[in-house]
Image (cartoon, rainbow, N blue to C red):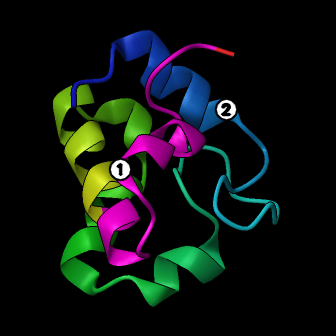
Amino acid sequence: MHLTKEQVTVLAQKRSCPRCDFDKTVGNALCRRCRSKLPSHMRSDIENIPSKDGWLVGRALKAAANYFDVHFQSIRNFGGGKKR
């Protein structure tokens, strides 16, 4: 999955976490609580995402979705796919 620079920027600016709807820090893909549940090697790729490549962020979001047992089609909830 490859995200465009615009999609990464929109994801970074969203205020709520796509997984649990808690508030998240701007610039991260997930809230602090959800990030803390991920292994450390997965955490770094979804933090400070505006400075990262869209391909890397897309891969990290797919890995996070698989880790949380979310169906791959639900990747759109994590910010990929169609624009809202």
Task: Estimate the spatial distance between the alpha carbons at disc 2 and disc 1, rounded to whole Å.
Answer: 23 Å
Query: For the N terminus, which image quadrant?
Result: top left
- Residue 29 appears left or right of 25: left
In this rendering, the answer to whether 22 lies above or below 38 is: above
Give the residue type at disc 1: Phe
- Residue 47 appears left or right of 2: right
**Label 1: which residue?**
72
Q: Residue at x 45, y 23 (%)?
A: 81
Indicate whether residue 34 is drawn in magenta.
no
**Circle 2 — which element?**
helix
Badge 1 local density, few (<14 within 10 Å), some, or many (20+)?
few
Q: What range is drawn magenta here?
A: 64-83
Contact between labelled residues 1 and 2, with CB atoms less than 8 Å apart? no
**Label 2: which residue?**
13
Q: Residue at x 78, y 44 (%)?
A: 15
Q: Residue at x 25, y 71 (%)?
A: 42
Q: Position of residue 62 (x, y in %)?
A: 29, 52
In front of the other: 56 or 63? 63
Indicate whether residue 68 is drawn in magenta.
yes
In front of the other: 9 or 18? 18
**Circle 1 — which element?**
helix
Query: For the C terminus, which image quadrant?
Result: top right
